């Protein structure tokens, strides 16, 4: 992930739909019982690309756990390596993937989670 960037198109100047932040929670699930109980449901999906089929295990959150956009925004605002621009009314935002992952892990380790209604 070194030197990787993530581009957001049309999600505003301060995006709250950041899949990478979910990855941080998944990475820490084995050391944090609250995160471990969050990710339980798995199913198989078939992805088809250019006529080739791929079987993938998909993981979703248990019911009752929603994204906490305030926390997503809070973490986003701590990132130093962001760039933004605008084309017409379309916001373009670029973040450094490594910095974002490190910040997301840091917040999770402090038990500041990206989800509401965690038991």
Image (tube, rainbow, N blue to C red):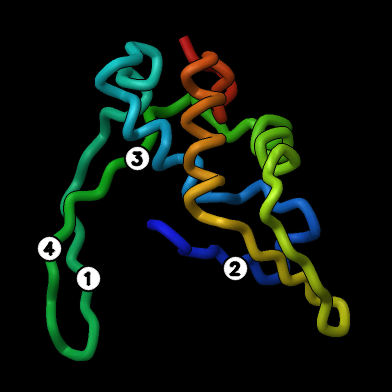
Q: Which residue is mark 2?
A: 7
How would you rate the neighbour count of disc 4 (Cα within 10 Å): few for under 14, some for 14-19, many for 20 or more? few
Measured in 3D between alpha carbons, the distance from the residue under mark 4 to the one under mark 1, in whole angstroms, is 6 Å
Q: Secondary structure at mark 4?
A: strand
Q: Earlier in the sequence, mark 3 or mark 2?
A: 2
Q: Residue at x 46, y 63 (%)?
A: 4
Give the side of residue 70 with respect to residue 109, left or right. Answer: right
Q: Residue at x 43, y 28 (%)?
A: 63
Tell me, yes or no, whether the two marked residues, 1 and 3, touch with CB atoms within 8 Å.
Answer: no
The image's mark for residue 60 is: 3
Residue 117 in picture, x, y percent from top left: 55, 17
Return the residue found at the far right: 88
Q: Earlier in the sequence, mark 4 or mark 1?
A: 1
Q: Toward the viewer: 51 or 79?
A: 79
Q: Earlier in the sequence, mark 1 or mark 2?
A: 2
Measured in 3D between alpha carbons, the distance from the residue under mark 1 to the one under mark 3, in whole angstroms, is 17 Å
Q: Nearer the viewer, mark 1 or mark 2?
A: 2
How would you rate the neighbour count of disc 1 (Cα within 10 Å): few for under 14, some for 14-19, many for 20 or more? few
Q: Earlier in the sequence, mark 3 or mark 4?
A: 4
Q: Quadrant of residue 93?
A: bottom right
Tell me, yes or no, whether the two marked residues, 4 and 1, touch with CB atoms within 8 Å.
Answer: no
How would you rate the neighbour count of disc 3 (Cα within 10 Å): few for under 14, some for 14-19, many for 20 or more? few
Q: Residue at x 31, y 20 (%)?
A: 36
Which quarter shows the N terminus? bottom left
Residue 88 in the image: above or below residue 118: below
Give the side of residue 88 with respect to residue 50, left or right. Answer: right
Q: Which residue is mark 1?
A: 47
Q: Which residue is mark 4?
A: 55
Measured in 3D between alpha carbons, the distance from the residue under mark 1 to the one under mark 2, in whole angstroms, is 23 Å
């Amino acid at each position: 992930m070194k030197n990787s960037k993530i581009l957001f198109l049309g999600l505003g100047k301060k995006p709250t739909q950041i899949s990478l932040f979910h990855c941080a929670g998944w990475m820490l699930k084995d050391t944090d019982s609250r995160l471990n109980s969050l990710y339980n449901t798995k199913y198989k999906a078939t992805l088809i690309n250019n006529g080739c089929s791929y079987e993938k295990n998909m993981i979703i959150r248990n019911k009752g756990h929603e994204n906490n956009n305030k926390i997503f925004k809070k973490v986003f605002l701590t990132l130093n390596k962001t760039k933004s621009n605008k084309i017409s009314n379309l916001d373009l935002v670029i973040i450094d993937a490594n910095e974002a992952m490190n910040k997301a892990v840091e917040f999770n380790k402090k038990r500041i989670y990206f989800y509401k209604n965690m038991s």
